[in-house]
Structures are given as C-alpha cells and as structure tokens.
Image (cartoon, helix red, strand yellow):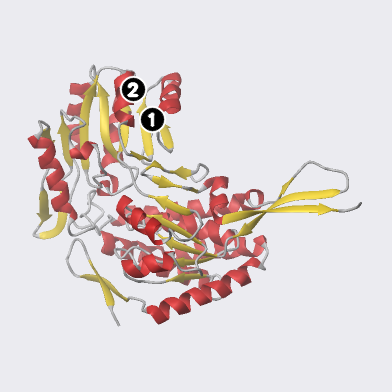
Amino acid sequence: MTTLTVDNPYTGDVACSVPLADEVTVNTVLDQARAAARAARATSLAQRKEWCERMVAAMEARAEAIATDITQMMGKPLAQARGEIRGMAERARYMISIADTALADIVLPPKVGFERRIVKEPLGVVLDLPAWNYPLLTAVNVVVPAVLAGNAVVVKHSPRSPLCGEHFARAFAEAGAPPHLVQAMHCDHPTSERMVGDPRVDHVVFTGSVYGGQRLTLAGATRFRHMGLELGGNDPAYVAPDCDFDKTVENVVDGAMYNAGQSCCAVERVYVHRSLYKRFTEACEALVRGYVLGDPMSDQTTLGPIAQPNHPLELEQLVEDARRKGARVVVGGKRTQVDGKGRFFEATLLAELDDSMQLMRQESFGPLLPIAPVDSDEEALAKMNNSELGLTASVWTKDRERAARFATQLEFGTVYMNRCDSVDPALPWIGVKNSGRGHSLSALGFDQLTRPKSIHFRLSF
C-alpha cells in the first residue's frame, strides 16, 4: 500500500502518514457514499441539523488535538489554529441556523385547482476537495451545508493536511450520523481526477490553485454538471486620502501577513494615494519589522513557516523579479531559518511597485506586502481591475459613497470597506474571472448543493 507522508514545516520531522487509496478502496468509498446519500435523503432536516450540531460539539471537544495537528502539518501558529476551530464552529452553526428557511420549498402564489412548488432536492454524493491553508474552514464551507441539504460527502483533503478530513468524518460518526455519511479518503492527484469523472459523484467542490481547477474541469468535462471552484486571488487594497490612517495601516499589514500570507483573500497588492504614500510606507515598515518568526507551537510566534517545501524559493524569485524591475525592498525579501530550523520567509515590505512585476499580477501566497502609489481614485480602480483574478478587494476610506462607487465597478466577488481578509458566513463567498465559479456560505450556498424540482399538480379538472 502506498503511503502519503507529511513533513512538519518547522522541524522537518514526520507530521503524519496516511495510506493512499487504491482502486478497490475508491470503489468501496463511493459505493458506501451512494448508500449513505439514499439514507440521508429519507431523513428530516431536523435530524440532519442535530447531526451537524453534535459534529461541531465533537470537534470542539477535541479542539487542542485538532489545532496541534494543523500546526504540525502546515505550520500555522497554534494560536491561529485554535482560532480556526472557533471560526469553523461559527460558520457551521450559522448554516444550521438558516437551514430551515434556506431549504424550504418555494411556494408560488395560489392558482385555482393547482399546487405549485419548487422543491430543493439533494444532489447525492458531494466530493469535497478542501485546501490546506485553512483546512477546517475550506472544508466546513461544503461539508455542513451539504449534509444539511441531504447529501453524503467524501472529503479528499489536501495532501498537506490530510488528518483534517479524518477529523470531520470521525466527528460525524460520533454525532450518530448514518454510516459513511461523511467519509475521509486520501489519494493522489490522478485518482482525484478520476473521481471527478466518476458517475457515482454528483457534485465536486475544489479549493486550490487555478491550475488545479483547470485539471479538474478537464477531468469532469464529459459530465454535464456544475463544479464549485474557489481558485484564489491577487487581492488589491486602495488606501484613499481620507482613510482612518492608523487603523488602515494596522489592518492592511495584518491582512497581508496573517497565516504567513497563505490566504486566498490576503491583501496582495496595495495602491496608496500619493498624498499618503511615504507616510504609509514608513508606518507599515514599523509593523512588518515586528513579526516574530519561530516555533509555531510557541505563543510568542506571530509568523509561522511556509507550508510547501518549494514555495520559499518561489517567493524569493517574485521578490527578485520586482527588485530587478525597479522595486525597493524595504524589509525582508529572503528565505530564512530560525535556529537552523524551518522553511521560513521573512515578513517582506516592498515599495515603488508597478503592474509589470509578477507579484502584482499573480497570487504570491506568502508574507509579502507590495505598495504602489496612485494619483486618483480612477487610477486605483483601473489598476485594481487589471487582473485575471477576482476574489476580494478592499477600499479604505471614511466616505461610504466613495466605497459604493468602487463596489459598483470593481470586478470581484467581495468588496470590503475598511476591512479585508475576512469571511462572513451570512454573505456568499464568490470568485469571478479565474478566481473560480459558484459560491459557498450564506443562504445562497445551499443552491450549489441542491437541485430544484418543479411540483406542478392539477388538483381538479
């Protein structure tokens, strides 16, 4: 049997090893999921809500062990991993709280002699392919609403964070859900692609890279169904002349550095009005220099190691490309270690950026804060939209009307005013352009996990 081994990004030791599924295992899991989907379809929403509530409680009861697994697998500081468990519970409980309304039949206006309703039916088996950077959040966005809607779920988690899929499956089993309602499976990429095309899978949701989304789309090309894709971003921020300066600096820096910048909605490029540019750069420098690299199990560490082995070099190459084209590296810019350990990248601030530089045009997924000056709202808007990606954008201003004008014209799934790098479960999480298709969370999130059926009864002639 082939085994997947995950290293600890800080120590280099083995964080975990899991067996990779062979063809027999894949067939067994999918057959079990089909049976579980039939069983779930026959249950009441009240029962499904109870399973989900108990699942959350089971995860919370094991919170410290789960947080430790996350930190050891992908390097997130332990305090942030604990916070992710709280965020997972919040999202799950919100989706549970709106399920009755969101999944209710749509009853049409009365028509004499007829009954007309739109029923929201479960799809069947949902294959969930979450990402490693927020391994609980990217999973719960799908798992809980899918179960609430009456589906079975197979969680094939990222090979960087495989134990998180097992935590969800175990918690649902402890919650008294039907056997195999939520299953975890580990497999290689070719096997994932084959599963996407398998007729026993009714819906696929993937969180990851644009390249991964392209591969999975091709794998499912012969099947006529929608696929949910959240493929990351190169998210811009605009700092307007009238911003709340100190709060803006604090939040923009945090939005770029949190989780070592390994976030699809991290701030990845900042356009600052020229009247504030020098002052803003200097204020950011003081904060960026304050990040503490070190053991992610320590409460003193505020910037953990980079999860993927090849990524520190890629980040260094992005910085070098910018430097070569005229950018100024104010702080950081290099791969490093702490006491001879870890694959770290320094918290990095760059100034005098322009849109010819690679890190202004692609997702960096690292602790980089590139800042460029602009002379007007119009210039900022044009530069923000000059991207093939469109996940989130933020506008930092005291003027709601300015933010509203930007929101109308920005080509992004979420537009923030005076915040960033944040997900509200009451709002749909949406990518446009190459940031994906479909949406999760909110009442609209259930629409991706159900299909409408028209009930058209003639009651009398």
Relative depth, front residue between 177 and 353: 353
Residue type marked 1: Asn
The quadrant of the image that shows the N terminus is bottom left
Q: Which quadrant of the figure has residue 322? A: top left
Cβ atoms at labels 2 and 1 below 8 Å apart: yes
Residue 66's image quarter?
Answer: bottom left
- Place of residue 261 in the rendered image (x, y in percent of width and height, measured from the top left): 26, 46
Which residue is found at the position 57% from the left and 75% from the top?
35
Q: In this view, does 331 lie above or below 205?
A: above
Q: Residues within 10 Å of mark 1 (few under 14, many from 20)?
A: many
Q: Which mark is residue 243?
A: 2
Q: In this view, does 228 lie to the left or right of 53?
A: left
Q: Name the residue that disc number 1 marks.
A: 418
In the rendering, at what x and y percent does residue 403 appear? 42, 24
Amino acid identity at mark 2: Cys
Count the labels in the image: 2
Residue found at x 12% / y 46%: 317
Nearest the camera: 240 or 24?
A: 24
